[in-house]
Image (cartoon, rainbow, N blue to C red):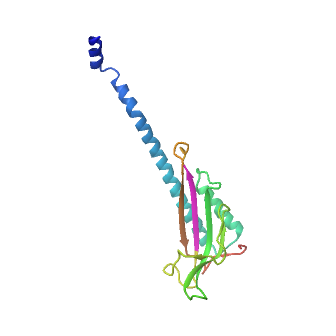
Amino acid sequence: MGKRFKTFAVDQRGVSAIEFAFVAPILIMLYLALAELTLGMMASRRTAHLGAAVGDLAAQSESLTVANINDLFDIGDSLLSPFDTGTKLKIILSSVTMSKNKSTGAEQASVDWSRSNGNIAAHAKGYVVGSITTSQISDGESLIMTEVEYDYDSPIGNFLPGQTAFTYTYYHHPRNGAAVDCTDCN
C-alpha cells in the first residue's frame, strides 16, 4: 500500500489537465465579463451618438412637423441597432428659449415645444429647464435640447440581474434662424 501511494504522489501524468480544470472557469468568466463590458460600452456610445445626431438634425431645420420629429425618432431607433429599443429607449426633443420671468425678473429657460417618442412624457409648454443658464444662451435666444435615456439589459441578465440606464442631454443652437419652430406641436 505504501509503495502505491508513493508512486501516485510522484506521478506527473495528468497534471496539465488538473491545472486546466482549475484555471478554465476563471478564464471563461473573465471572457464573459469582458464581452459584457464591451456590449455595455457599445450601447452607451450608441445612445450618446443617437442623442447628438437627433439634436443636430433638428437644429439644422428652420421648422419641424410632428411627422419630421417622428422620423428623427425612427432614425434614433436604427442608430441603436443591434440593441433592442422598444420601450427601453426614451427620447425628448424640445425647443427652449431664455427669457425674463415677469414676476421675479430673473432669466430662465422655458420650453416652447416638446415632443417625445412615446416611452416618456414630453415637457409641457412653459416648463422651466434649470440646467440651462445664461452662460449657454442669452435673453431671447433658443436651443434645441435632446434628452436620451436607454435602459440597457445585460445579455447575461439571468445570472447578473439589474438594469443600467444610460442618460445623456445635448444642447444645439439653431443653425438656420433664431429658433426652430414646430408647426403642429402642442
Residue in the foreground of this view, choosing between 141 and 13: 13
Q: In the orientation shown, which residue stands out farthest toward the front?
A: 1
- Mark yes or no: residue 150 visible: yes
| The N terminus: image quadrant | top left
Q: Is residue 7 rendered to the left or right of residue 153?
A: left
State the image coordinates of residue 71 (x, y, percent, origin top left): 67, 63
State the image coordinates of residue 162 (x, y, percent, origin top left): 54, 50
Q: Which quadrant of the figure has residue 100?
A: bottom right
Q: Is residue 86 above or below residue 156?
A: below
Residue in the foreground of this view, choosing between 62 and 130: 130
State the image coordinates of residue 57 (x, y, percent, origin top left): 60, 68
> In the rendered structure, does residue 145 fall within the stretch colored magenta?
yes
Residue in the foreground of this view, choosing between 41 and 163: 163
State the image coordinates of residue 81 (x, y, percent, origin top left): 59, 52
Q: Which quadrant of the figure has residue 149?
A: bottom right
The residue positioned 48% from the left and 80% from the top of the image is: 135
Q: Is residue 17 above or below residue 59?
A: above
Q: Which quadrant of the figure has residue 68?
A: bottom right
Prevailing SS of the magenta stretch: strand
> In the rendered structure, does residue 111 fall within the stretch colored magenta?
no
The residue positioned 44% from the left and 40% from the top of the image is: 29
| The C terminus: image quadrant | bottom right
The residue positioned 37% from the left and 25% from the top of the image is: 17
Q: Which residues are magenta?
A: 144-153
